Image: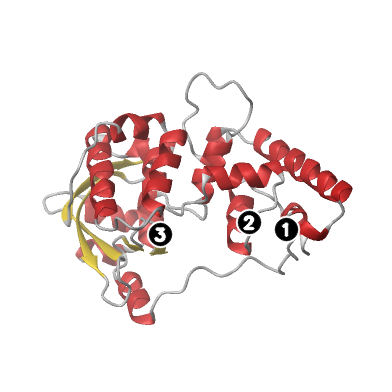
Amino acid sequence: MDISRLPAAARQRRSSEIRAFLRSRRARLTPADVGMPAGAGRRTPGLRREEVAVLAGVGVSWYTWLEQGRDINVSADVLDAVARVLRLDDAERAHLYLLSGLNPPPSPPKDQDVPDGLRRVIDGWLPRPAYVVDRHWNLVAVNRAARLVFGYGDTDHNCLVTFFTSARYRAALCHWEDAARQVAGQFRADAARYPDDPEFGRLAADMCAASPAFAEIWAEHPVGSATQGIKALNHPEAGELVFDYTSLPVPELPGHRLLLHTPAPDSRTAERLAALQGTPEAAAR
């Protein structure tokens, strides 16, 4: 449906409806519902626009225009991302599609495809965590161990966003403040490799709007890069887990990286990882 061809009165009604609909769905959620810290000084109930946009992986300006009912280009992918963050049921998701001028598909689109060989690598790395990110740090493929260990769920689309917005991740990760500066520095270094790619600037600006912690660190202009290191966390079920990680380029997907995690020696991580996944053989690997 081409919304621009609707009569002016119909366009106005549609704009009012989508604005009221999205605002009401934001208002019924709390930061805790989506795993974000509540923070202080919130003047409005529910999630802020900036938080919905960042969690959905869309620009704050774009989401604001969507909620205002402006005539903008929309796609099934971004509408589904918004629907997941706002926890819309099937009827609400279909309503959002219709208000946006699209016919609702019968089911959400499948996850982004990755080469079969790469999928076998991350699945074969079990019971150890492994995942693939693109150059913007979007999660492209995640194995079961990474979901269990790091808490990546269906609404986690980007490592940077999860690091700075997930209360669960922050509570679990050891030395979060030090790691935060390293993460921000790595993202800035990656952005410098693609000076003609505006997505890095858009994502950084949106993160500054959604996360005061990121905004404070980003203003310090940290720069860094790491292809290997150590991740330590206190898992709510497994206890202390310490991993050596390695980041490898993916030749068939330029800009993508494969992150492999191995239990650190002289730790009980392998044993605890095995217990977490219910796979006794994990301790021997």
On the image, the x and y values in percent for residue 188 come to: 27, 46
Q: Residue at x 39, y 53 (%)?
A: 198
Give how far across and how far down residue 163 sits, in percent. Answer: 36, 43
Question: Which three-letter amino acid code belongs to the residue tagged 2?
Answer: Leu
**Residue sitting at 58 percent across and 33 percent down?**
48
Residue 270 position, x and y percent, is 23, 56
Q: To which quarter of the image does residue 144 belong?
A: bottom left
Residue to which mark 3 is pinned = 139
Camera-side residue: 140 or 195?
A: 195
Q: Is residue 42 left or right of residue 149?
A: right
Mark 2 and 1 residues: CB-CB less than 8 Å, in contact?
A: yes
Give amino acid for label 1. Answer: Tyr
Amino acid beneath label 3: Leu
Task: In the rendered view, tell whether residue 220 sits above or below residue 151.
Answer: above
**Quadrant where the image shows the N terminus:** bottom right
Q: Residue furthest left?
A: 266
